[in-house]
Image (spheres, helix red, strand yellow):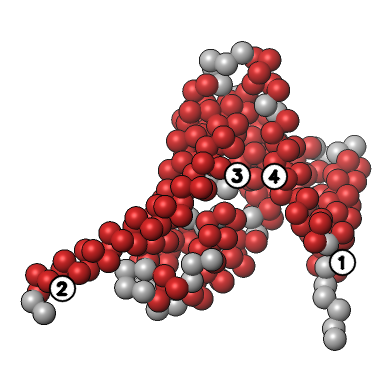
Amino acid sequence: MSLKAVVRTEESARLYMVQKGVARGVPIMLGYLPVALTYGVLAKQAGMTVAEITLMSVLVFAGASQFMGAAMIAAGTGAIEIIIATFVLNFRHFVMSFSFMNRLRFIGLQWKVPLSLGLTDETFSVASMHTEEAKQEKGMYFYAALMITAYSAWVAGSFLGGVLGDVIPAVLSQSMGIALYAMFIGLLLPSVRKELRVGLIAVIAMLVNAFSSQFISDGWAIVSGTLIGGLCGVFLLKEEKQ
């Protein structure tokens, strides 16, 4: 086979994987846009500028953490509390990254680093359903296209939400605050259905937060509830030895 034919074959394989990744990323994109839009509006309501709102999405790319961060900023919480709470909330990304990178162990570090930054609950779930691509030629382009599609939608939605935060009526923007609670409940309920003890952990974290807020700042109260709730989860969800 000539060199030109080899190049064409590689380009075809790359294009196929990119198209396939974008196609799998479109459902995530459609789900991200309204949530990112809501985040942008709420963050704007919390006093953040459009540039700050967009930059947070560019650098953080974590929906739950960004919603929590916007709420903590609105409450006047300090940077250290926000960083610690975000670290604890996103600790699961270590586990997801280990699992994902185990499938990509034959891919070079120049691909692993950027791909790890694109992992979210949604992109990880979709990537976990497409394990064969990791073994195929140019398979890394599938995962890159999947994550870039989701990432672009999140950043664009955040920017648009920040812009609309100055345009839409105050009553409507304030009513969107319910999205914060709805999102966390939506994340919690599926786990509670599988294991009731997850609900108990959530209640413990809530009570610790409510109690702590009587003595310390709201930011540290959230950190306390998150840490103690997570620690309780280590013991409550510990599998019994057979």
Residue 29: x, y in percent? 49, 44
| Labels 4 and 3 touching (C-beta < 8 A) | no
Please state which amino acid type lies under the numbered disc 2. Answer: Val
Q: Report the side of 25 relative to 205 (left or right).
A: left
In the displayed structure, 166 sits above or below 211; it is: above
The label shown at residue 6 is: 2
Quarter of the rendering containing residue 135 = bottom left
The answer to whether marks 4 and 1 mark residues whose Cβ atoms lie closer than 8 Å is no
Which residue type does callout 1 highlight? Answer: Leu
Disc 4 versus disc 3: distance between alpha carbons?
Answer: 18 Å
The residue mark sitting in front, 4 or 1, is: 1
Q: Earlier in the sequence, mark 4 or mark 3?
A: 3
Type of the residue with mark 3 = Gly
- Residue type at the position of mark 4: Glu
User: Who comes first in sequence, dot 2 or dot 4?
Assistant: 2
Residue designated by label 1: 236
